[in-house]
């Protein structure tokens, strides 16, 4: 008889998430170059590269996609806050022993704002420039992995953030194509 045991599917799923987190996070602290690279991706890459790409698209006369990128980014942040209101998942460094490479406030970790916003912008830019979009989608994956490596997020936080960012941008782009005339 199982009763109230923690051996159900949800427990197993969370266990695997935490196990994968430790597998990635335990790689930190072993190589100063790798640590600094991951800190750069986790903390600075998004605020340097993404604005440059948005400016590039803006000056290439595609202001509509820039506006849609901002709408996607703001929309996903609202969605993330809504989710966080119902499920406030503590950050890994609060719950577990981790290698914390980047200090962070004690807010919720699910879903990852960095992963979702970077993916939302990357997907939106992909619609007008496949090359830049692909680079940014790959960069979003690196941002996500680096945030796990640095001890800030569990893998599920990143995966859901990436998925939501993709989904929101896709929906906003499709709606804009349907209701806004394109020249």
Image (cartoon, rainbow, N blue to C red):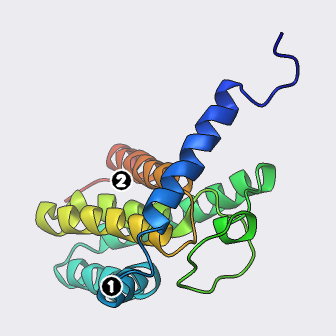
In the visual, does 123 lie left or right of 133?
A: right
Residue found at the very far top of the displayed protein? 1
Q: Local crowd at mark 2 within 10 Å, few (<14), some, or many (≥20)?
A: few
Location of the C terminus by quadrant is: bottom left
Q: For marks 1 and 2, give the CA distance.
A: 41 Å
Mark 1 Cα shell of 10 Å, populated few (<14), some (14-19), many (≥20):
few
Compared to 79, does 14 lie above or below?
Answer: above
User: In this orientation, does residue 183 appear?
Assistant: yes
Residue at the spot x=56%, y=72% of the render? Answer: 151
Residue annotated with mark 2: 180
Q: Position of residue 78 (x, y in %)?
A: 65, 61
Which secondary structure, mark 1?
helix
Expressed as whole percent of the image width and height from the top left, the position of residue 19 reads: 54, 50
In the image, which is nearer the foreground, mark 1 or mark 2? 1
Which badge, 1 or 2, is on the more N-terminal residue? 1
Q: Residue farthest to the right?
A: 4
Residue at x 60%, y 71% (from the top left corner): 98
* Image side of residue 95 versus residue 70, left or right: right
For the residues bearing labels 1 and 2, Cβ distance under 8 angstroms: no
Q: Position of residue 95 (x, y in %)?
A: 74, 63
Residues 67 and 179: in front is: 67
Specify the quadrant of the image occupied by residue 39: bottom left
SS of the residue under disc 2: loop
Q: Is residue 172 left or right of residue 62?
A: right
Asked if one can make out residue 68 in the rendered structure from this viewpoint, the answer is no
Looking at the image, is 156 positioned above or below residue 8? below
The answer to which quarter of the image holds residue 3 is: top right
Could you say where residue 31 lies in the image, as x and y percent from the top left? 34, 84
At a point 33% along the width and 79% down the height, the residue shown is 50
Indicate which disc residue 37 carries.
1
Is 143 placed above or below 22 here? Answer: below
* Image quarter (top left, top right, bottom left or bottom right) of the N terminus: top right
């Amino acid at each position: 008889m199982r009763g109230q045991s923690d051996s159900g599917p949800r427990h197993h799923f969370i266990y695997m998430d935490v196990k994968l987190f430790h597998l990635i996070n335990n790689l930190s602290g072993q190589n100063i170059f790798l640590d600094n690279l991951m800190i750069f991706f986790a903390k600075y890459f998004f605020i340097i590269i993404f604005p440059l790409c948005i400016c590039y698209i803006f000056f290439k006369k595609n202001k509509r996609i820039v506006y849609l990128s901002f709408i996607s980014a703001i929309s996903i942040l609202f969605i993330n806050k809504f989710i966080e209101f119902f499920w406030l998942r503590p950050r890994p460094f609060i719950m577990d022993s981790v290698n914390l490479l980047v200090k962070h406030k004690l807010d919720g970790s699910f879903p990852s704002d960095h992963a979702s916003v970077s993916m939302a912008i990357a997907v939106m830019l992909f619609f007008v420039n496949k090359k830049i979009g692909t680079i940014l989608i790959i960069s979003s994956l690196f941002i996500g992995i680096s945030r796990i490596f640095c001890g800030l997020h569990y893998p599920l936080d990143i995966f859901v953030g990436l998925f939501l960012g993709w989904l929101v941008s896709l929906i906003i782009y499709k709606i804009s194509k349907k209701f806004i005339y394109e020249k």
